Image: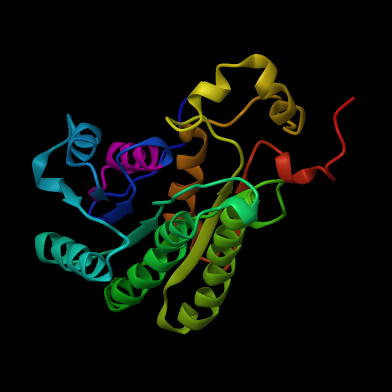
């Protein structure tokens, strides 16, 4: 199936967590739509891989630990210094830890919160003046797990709920500046983290049971929604958390029989 057509010529995009999974699909989709894209993450080799085959003059790989506020600020400054502006920021980097709250190590909670929430805080704060200058937009990757509860995911769900409400509140605060703020909320998506589970048909059955479209998501299913929210077609859209979940969140939770 052909991806919807967008034209982001002369648009500078920053994608965090862009070396793998959903972030890599978003990065490639913007590059295919002629955007200038800076991609950040911890693994330099993965960042370079996702940029392969695209012109060096409109690509940049910025190795960044997003849990370090100083590195987040330096990342934004590096992108603006290199390309002269910043039009679209995609806050996609995320961490995941599951299990009963009483068994979740403090260190894992702190790391997940730092990656999912604190990094968005520092990224938004430092990107704001550049987005005001360009009339740009910020898009975050939240999750359907930030909309409802899940068994064994209290910590993760709390961080994603924070992302969703952060987006809504920033949209209110930044609207007068001409900056739009939105989020996408995927459900179960097959990435490097989940591919082993996805290969087990029996283990996947309860997940697929909840999906109206009858299959789990792929990163390439999420990317077009992000491009739409960044596009002129969404010029009057701000403050939304868009489920891109195959109909998962349409259900009351009762099984498909």
| Quadrant where the C terminus is found in the figure | top right
Does residue 179 show up magenta in the picture?
no
Q: What is the quadrant of residue 214 in the picture?
A: top right
- Residue at the outermost right position: 257
Task: Judge whether residue 192 can be spotted in this image.
Answer: yes
Magenta span: helix, strand or loop, mainly?
A: helix
Give the image location of residue 243, x and y in percent.
Answer: 63, 49
Front-lying residue, 139 or 41: 41
Q: Examine the rendered structure and indicate whether residue 212 appears above or below residue 231.
A: above
Counting the numbered discs, the total is 0
Front-lying residue, 219 or 5: 219
Q: Colour scheme of this structure image? A: rainbow
Q: What is the quadrant of residue 139 in the picture?
A: bottom left
Q: Examine the rendered structure and indicate whether residue 86 appears above or below residue 254.
A: below
Give the image location of residue 41, x and y in percent.
Answer: 27, 48
Front-lying residue, 1 or 163: 163
Does residue 26 show up magenta in the picture?
yes
Judge from the rendering whether residue 227 lies leftward or rightward of residue 24; answer left or right: right
Give the image location of residue 251, x and y in percent.
Answer: 81, 42
Q: Residue at x 32, y 52 (%)?
A: 15
| Range covered by the magenta-colored residues | 23-38
Q: Residue at x 66, y 23 (%)?
A: 204
Q: Residue at x 25, y 34 (%)?
A: 50
Task: Judge whether residue 137 can be spotted in this image.
Answer: no
Judge from the rendering whether residue 77 lies leftward or rightward of residue 253; answer left or right: left
Give the image location of residue 198, x and y in percent.
Answer: 57, 22
Q: Residue at x 59, y 51 (%)?
A: 103
């Amino acid at each position: 199936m052909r991806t919807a057509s967008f034209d982001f010529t002369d648009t500078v995009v920053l994608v965090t967590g862009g070396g793998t999974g959903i972030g890599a699909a978003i990065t490639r989709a913007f590059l295919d739509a002629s955007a200038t894209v800076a991609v950040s993450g911890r693994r330099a080799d993965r960042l370079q891989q996702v940029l392969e085959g695209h012109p060096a003059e409109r690509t940049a790989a910025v190795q960044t630990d997003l849990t370090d506020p100083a590195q987040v600020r330096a990342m934004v400054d590096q992108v603006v210094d290199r390309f002269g502006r910043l039009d679209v920021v995609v806050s996609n980097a995320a961490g995941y830890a599951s299990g009963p709250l009483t068994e979740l190590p403090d260190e894992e909670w702190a790391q997940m919160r730092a990656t999912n929430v604190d990094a968005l805080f520092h990224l938004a704060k430092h990107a704001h003046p550049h987005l005001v200058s360009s009339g740009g937009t910020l898009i975050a990757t939240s999750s359907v797990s930030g909309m409802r509860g899940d068994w064994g995911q209290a910590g993760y769900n709390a961080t994603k709920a924070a992302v969703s409400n952060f987006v809504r509140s920033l949209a209110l605060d930044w609207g007068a500046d001409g900056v739009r703020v939105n989020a996408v909320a995927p459900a179960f998506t097959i990435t490097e983290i989940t591919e082993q589970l996805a290969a087990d048909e029996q283990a996947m059955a309860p997940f697929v049971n909840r999906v109206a479209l009858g299959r789990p998501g792929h990163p390439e299913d999420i990317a077009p929604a992000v491009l739409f929210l960044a596009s002129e077609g969404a010029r009057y859209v701000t403050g939304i958390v868009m489920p891109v979940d195959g109909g998962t969140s349409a259900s009351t939770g009762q099984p498909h029989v």
